[in-house]
């Protein structure tokens, strides 16, 4: 009797844990391309990047010109003049490297601007996905765009359009 109760309890525990978990997929690239604010933010980032790159290229050209002038005049310069010109070139190259780091470094202006423009959009998408997952009982929602190990997934579990609808962007 005790054995049969044990086996029944074990069977109930096993069946309770064996319930299938629900999964869903989203395609973040598809979602982002469908949001006009994302496209606008991308255009703004591109414009800022081009402007800063032009500024860097201008400074690089100035450094290059200083170096060429130094090379052409070095034979006629005194040691003191040569040293002064070399210091000028080094200072220009240092300011160029600093400007590059300021704009495009890990904590640079481009990074800050990207965070400022993209973070609210990403947070909004995350909240919509989270709400859908909780409403529908999904154990996990996977981004198809970044999950390179997914070989095939049924289109039935893709909720990208539902996320867009939840955000107010219907297709």
Image (cartoon, rainbow, N blue to C red):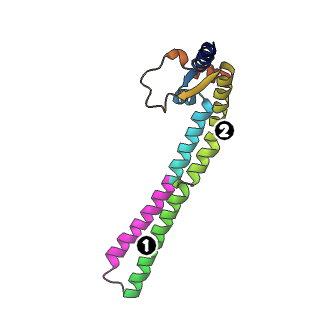
How many residues crowd mark 2 within 10 Å: few (<14), some (14–19), many (20+)? few
Q: How many marks?
A: 2
Image quarter for residue 151? top left
**The N terminus sits in image quarter:** top right
Q: Secondary structure at mark 1?
A: helix
Q: Is residue 169 visible?
A: no
- Asked if the stretch drawn in magenta spans residue 75, the answer is yes
The reply to whether callout 1 and callout 2 are in contact (CB within 8 Å) is no
Location of residue 27 with respect to 85 vertically, above or below = above
Instruction: First in sequence, mark 1 or 2: give its number.
Output: 1
**The C terminus sits in image quarter:** top right
Q: Residue at x 53, y 14 (%)?
A: 156
Q: Is residue 51 left or right of residue 65?
A: right
Q: Is residue 115 visible?
A: yes
User: Residue 130 in the image: x percent, y percent?
Assistant: 66, 28
- In this rendered view, identify the residue nearer to me: 126 or 37: 126
Location of residue 140 with respect to 5 vertically, above or below = below
Residue hosting label 1: 89
Q: Is residue 144 left or right of residue 12?
A: left
How many residues crowd mark 1 within 10 Å: few (<14), some (14–19), many (20+)? some
Q: Residue at x 61, y 30 (%)?
A: 36
Residue hosting label 2: 120
Location of residue 3 with respect to 68 vertically, above or below = above
Q: CA distance from mark 1 to mark 2?
A: 43 Å
Point out the frontmost of discs 1 and 2.
2
Image quarter for residue 168? top right
Q: Secondary structure at mark 2?
A: helix
- Asked if the stretch drawn in magenta spans residue 4, the answer is no
Specify start and end residues of the magenta stretch as a single range: 53-77
Question: Residue furthest toward the front?
Answer: 1
């Amino acid at each position: 009797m005790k054995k049969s109760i044990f086996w029944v309890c074990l069977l109930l525990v096993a069946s309770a844990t064996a319930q299938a978990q629900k999964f869903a997929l989203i395609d973040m690239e598809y979602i982002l391309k469908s949001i006009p604010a994302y496209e606008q933010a991308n255009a703004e980032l591109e414009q800022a990047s081009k402007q800063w790159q032009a500024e860097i290229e201008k400074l690089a050209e100035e450094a290059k010109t200083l170096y060429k002038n130094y090379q052409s005049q070095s034979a006629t310069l005194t040691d003191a003049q040569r040293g002064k010109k070399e210091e000028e070139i080094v200072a220009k190259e240092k300011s160029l490297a600093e400007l590059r780091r300021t704009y495009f470094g890990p904590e640079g202006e481009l990074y800050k601007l990207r965070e400022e423009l993209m973070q609210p959009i990403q947070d909004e998408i995350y909240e919509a996905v989270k709400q859908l997952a909780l409403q529908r009982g999904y154990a996990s929602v996977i981004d198809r765009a970044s999950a390179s190990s997914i070989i095939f997934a049924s289109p039935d579990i893709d909720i990208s359009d539902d996320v867009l609808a939840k955000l107010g962007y219907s297709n």
